[in-house]
Amino acid sequence: MSTPKISRPQFPPGYVENPTKTVPWEMVEQRLAEAKNYWLCSVHSDGRPHVVPRWAVYVDDKIYYDGSPETRHARNIAQNPRVALHLESGDQALIIDGTAKEAGKPSEELATKIAGAYCAKYTPFGYSPQPDQWNEGGLFVFTPKKVLTWTNFMDDPTRFTIE
């Protein structure tokens, strides 16, 4: 991925008057790699939002998560791939707009990376997928497009645009 374009988010008057810092992209990547729970928001065909917590991994600049194609969020993204994803903290927010889709069968190299990342993070919680787990489907990929983040809302709200 090319380096994301950094800018300051626009807020209504009175929200953030004089921010002095920005969040480094490396911190965004670290938080994505280390997070346990990710909240995924998709949209029903009638426009209602659907939010679900997911376990996921950040590999090669994308977020991978798995599950049945029959789940509500999977059916939603099959109709509308535009989704939002965020981590749990509201104090140190990380909110991402992007697209999600079924990943199909990953290459052996990618499957090994994804399984390794899952095992490193989720084995203590009883989940240790093998690289061949997604040979028949069930793997999804979220591609970030825009990131809004802060570690101190009044001082460092930062927007990244990924092309």
Image (tube, rainbow, N blue to C red):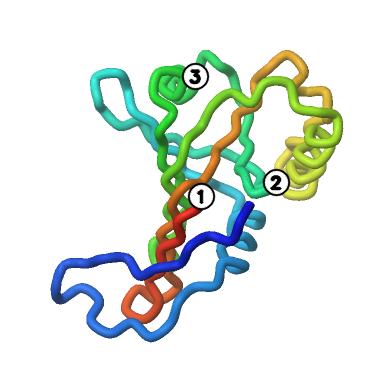
For residue 71, the mark is 3
Mark 1 and mark 2 lie on one chain; the one further toward the N terminus is 2
Depth check: give the residue in front, 70 or 124: 70
Q: Residues within 10 Å of mark 1 (few under 14, many from 20)?
A: few
The answer to which image quadrant residue 25 occupies is bottom right
Depth check: give the residue in front, 162 or 125: 162
- Rounded to the nearest angstrom, the CA distance separating label 1 from label 3 is 29 Å
Mark 3 and mark 2 lie on one chain; the one further toward the N terminus is 2
Name the residue that disc number 1 marks: 163
21 on left or right of 59: left
Please tell me whether mark 2 sits on a helix, a strand or a loop.
Answer: strand
Q: What amino acid is at disc 3?
A: Thr
Q: Is residue 98 above or below residue 67?
A: below
Q: Position of residue 123 (x, y in %)?
A: 77, 43
Name the residue that disc number 2 marks: 59
Mark 1 and mark 3 lie on one chain; the one further toward the N terminus is 3
Depth check: give the residue in front, 128 or 7: 7
Asked whether the residues under the numbered discs 1 and 2 touch, taking CB atoms below 8 Å apart as contact, a structural biologist would say no
Closer to viewer: mark 1 or mark 3: 1
In percent of the image, x 74 and y 36: which residue is there? 127
Q: Is residue 79 above or below residue 20?
A: above
Depth check: give the residue in front, 19 or 118: 19
The answer to which image quadrant residue 73 occupies is top left
Please tell me whether mark 3 sits on a helix, a strand or a loop.
Answer: loop
The answer to which image quadrant residue 69 occupies is top right
Q: What amino acid is at disc 1?
A: Glu
Closer to viewer: mark 1 or mark 2: 1
In percent of the image, x 24 and y 19: which residue is there? 46
Q: Residues within 10 Å of mark 3 (few under 14, many from 20)?
A: few
Q: Position of residue 108 (x, y in %)?
A: 85, 29
